[in-house]
Image (spheres, rainbow, N blue to C red):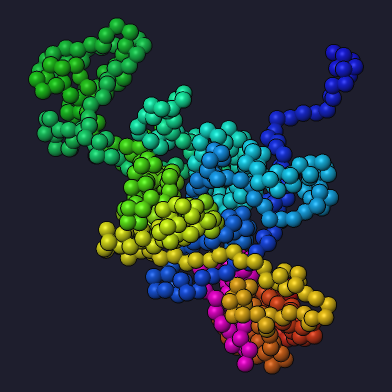
Amino acid sequence: MAESLQSANVPLNREAYSLNWLGKSYARYLRDCPPQTLLAEDATHNQQAQNRHSQNLLIKGDNLEVLKHLKNAYQNQVKMIYIDPPYNTGSDGFVYQDDRKFSPEQLAELATMSIEEAKRVLDFTAKKSNSHSAWLTFMYPRLYVARQLLKDDGVIFISIDDNEQAQLKLLCDEVFGEENFVGEIAWQKIHSTKNDAKYFSNSHEYIFCYAKIISNIEIKLLPRTEKMNARFSNPDNDPRGVWSSGDLIANEERSSGYFDVISPNGQVFNVPKGKHWVYSQENLEKLIQENRIWFGKNGTAFPRLKRFLSEVQQGKKADTLWFSEYFGNNQEAKREIKKLFNDISLFDTPKPVRLITQILRLSSNSNDLIMDFFAGSGTTAHAVMQLNAEDGGNRQFICVQLPEETDKKSEAYKAGYCTIFDITQARIEKSAVKIRQDFPDFNGDLGFQIFETVPDFRALADDDFQPQQELPTVGELSDEQYRTLLTTWRLYDGNPLTTPLQAVSLGDYFANWCGNTLYIVQAGFDSRAIKALLHKLDQDNHFLPERIVLFGDNVDSAKQKELQQALHSYTNRKKLNISLLVRY
């Protein structure tokens, strides 16, 4: 056989099952390369009273860039991620867009691929493709980084439809591990039938659930509904409360389960042929004595077991069919948005608040961090605040949305919402107002802080530099650019965005302190500031930096060396071991 294959020029190399597509090597490169942007705060918004101390975040920008910015500070911190990514239906506007510029030779070297493959990848990025390969190239690095943000007992829920459902399952198996697949849920998105459908009336979407480590997770019970509890009654006025009845017999014959049962009024019952009592005779007689067996109002009905509501689980195990009656649907979601936005229709297929609150109940605790990096209409943020108001929780959210332009003919644009981000922000603000009205006694966090990705001005300065010009320095930068550098660096150094940034006086010079790091960024750092720093290290018991970060453009090499020597030779009484880093 081998000789026959060889004679037919059939390759006999080792093969294995795997997911491959055009652009996978490039997707791996995108996964690993650092962000191209900086992160800036919206100081005006963040200083408003309701937002100043909020732990909730809304971030404007490309979500892959944002995820990379967040990685160091939020690794292993997020309990639940919900995303509703582009479905790639052909009409949802998804195209692969990438502003990175490479020659085929550069890309081939960076992404470890052939020149021919590099040319094909550059071709579909230039053409703004919406192929399966383009969609997978878009999704892979985002899911990969998102997994790093999940806690070890964290889960991710991903909405999708038929167009990319098969590809998403294989992709998630690769990113999260096939062994960490929790379930695939069918959610009823509409409850009416479309009679004009060509083949079937499509009434559902899918929601994939994956764990970071499946052995660590807990999927909780859903609350019991009034409809479930309506099945319980108390026809015999039992003091233990309402109950429902269940069978006492099971299929198959068992000699130990075949005996007479005598009711309190003397009537005799036995099991039909081929069945048996589920309890032993001794246990059944005990249940009868405890009034846990129901023989009907007249005492002549076939016996059934009484199950009291007070003794059943305080919840229901979720199944994988989610009907709109309990989880909402698209029409309900549209009504929610129109009610908040004065009857303006802003989205065609938003997700209802009930869907996300149920997911939150299943997968989170009251103080957990929740993330949605395709925030869209802002439903996840709304649901987090809503559930907090209902159960007194303190969940926090991180939502990310690209400032994608709305159609100029759309109701959203005509109403002044020029980007999807504008809608996201307004939805969160309006839902917070409504929650405050609906729950006047709730004192939880209904604010949020805004950050956004911005071009790296250091790279711009280098690109614009001409030989006859002097090198730009941070002293020439605006206060906003200075704050942007500090925001980006403190996040990179592992400090969450809500960690306070404090000014530190070093004589006439001001540095900034966050977490365990001192930042020396502004121009003017001199020998007097170094002396003041050493004094503060020695005298201030609360000043315990483990790291000092210098901006090399504003602290020249002589001062860098002077500070390094001072830290090395000066023995502070706290015996701190301080590392010195220079960044540009």
Q: Nearer the viewer, residue 410 or 278?
A: 410
Q: Is residue 493 magenta?
A: yes
Indicate left or right for 73 with 407 as reference: right
- For image coordinates 17% across by 28% down, the residue present is 291
Q: Is residue 346 magenta?
A: no
Query: As displayed, is residue 31 above or below residue 442?
Result: above
Occupied quadrant, residue 439: bottom left
Which residue, as the protein is rendered here, is positioned at the far top? 273
Is residue 258 shown to the viewer in this render?
yes
Q: Nearer the viewer, residue 199 or 558?
A: 199
Is 517 displayed left or right of 266 in the figure?
right
Q: Quarter holding the C terminus?
A: bottom right
Residue 456: give x, y in percent of width and height.
67, 68
Rendered view: 471 above or below 335: below
Give above or below for 244 relative to 34: above
Magenta range: 487-515
Residue nearest the observer in this picture, 435 or 265: 435
Q: Quadrant of residue 299?
A: top left
Q: Position of residue 314 (x, y in %)?
A: 31, 41
Q: Residue furthest front?
A: 409
- The residue shown at (52%, 43%) is 92
